[in-house]
Image (tube, rainbow, N blue to C red):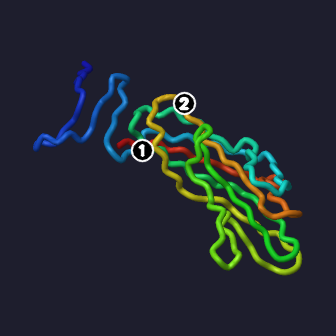
Amino acid sequence: MTSILGTQSIQHPNGTASATVLADGTFSSPGHVVQIVTHEFNDNTSISTYGTTYTDITNAAITITPKHSNSKILIMPNIIFYMTVTGTYVYGGIRLLRGSSTVVAPTNSTDGNGAYDYGYSKTTSGSAQLDLRHCGHHVDTPATTSATTYKFQGINYSAGRYMNFNYAGGSSSIVAMEIAQ
């Protein structure tokens, strides 16, 4: 014989609610992971244009549909790229967008010594290749239960140099986690 217990919330004996059971059967407790979405990509993107505009990194996007409108979304990229260094410097950056809104981006300002904070920079002499991995933990609150797309873009601030993503079969990934509040 099967027994079914129906409830909308589970609470501590002192009366504080510690978990909720939604109409769709989803269990929700603050701080727990509601869902995880992963995306791997190996498309090559080369940004050689020196400029002030960001360029989409091919296929560096992930879509998650939050189950709760108050959830936090934790985005964890692992994007492989390199920057060419010819001469004395190279500057570049990567930003994260939710739709068309910037979630996080490097600042492009001078520190008074002529060095710029574009996210990635290297001062050297001669020619070299700066191999990098963009990893981090970005937290966003989209305040929606609609499908939400996050994407990464790169920018090259060094004339005559370039940023190359997933070169020679490199593979990158993005993880999106919904965290209940």
Element carrying mark 1: strand
Q: Position of residue 174 (x, y in %)?
A: 62, 48
Q: Position of residue 30 (x, y in %)?
A: 32, 44
Could you classify mark 1 by the number of other residues whose Cα lies within 10 Å: few (under 14), some (14-19), or many (20 or more)?
A: many
Q: Position of residue 121 (x, y in %)?
A: 72, 69
Instruction: Indicate the quadrant containing the C terminus: top left, top right, bottom left or bottom right.
Output: top left
Examine the rendered structure and indicate whether residue 129 appears above or below residue 53.
below
Specify the quadrant of the image occupied by residue 156: bottom right
Q: In the drawing, what numbered circle is on residue 147?
A: 2
Which of the pair 129/40 is nearer the observer? 129
Three-letter residue code for mark 2: Ala
Element carrying mark 2: loop
Which of the pair 74/162 is nearer the observer? 162
Which residue ends up furthest to the left in the rendered image? 14
129 horizontally vs 178: left or right:
right
Which of the pair 40/180 is nearer the observer? 180
Examine the rendered structure and indicate whether residue 107 appears above or below residue 179.
below
Label 2 or label 1, whichever lies nearer to me, is: 2
Residue at x 83%, y 52% (from the top left corner): 46
Q: Position of residue 29 (x, y in %)?
A: 31, 41
Q: Are marks 2 and 1 in contact (CB under 8 Å)?
A: no
Residue at x 33%, y 27% (from the top left corner): 22
Which residue ends up furthest to the top in the rendered image? 1
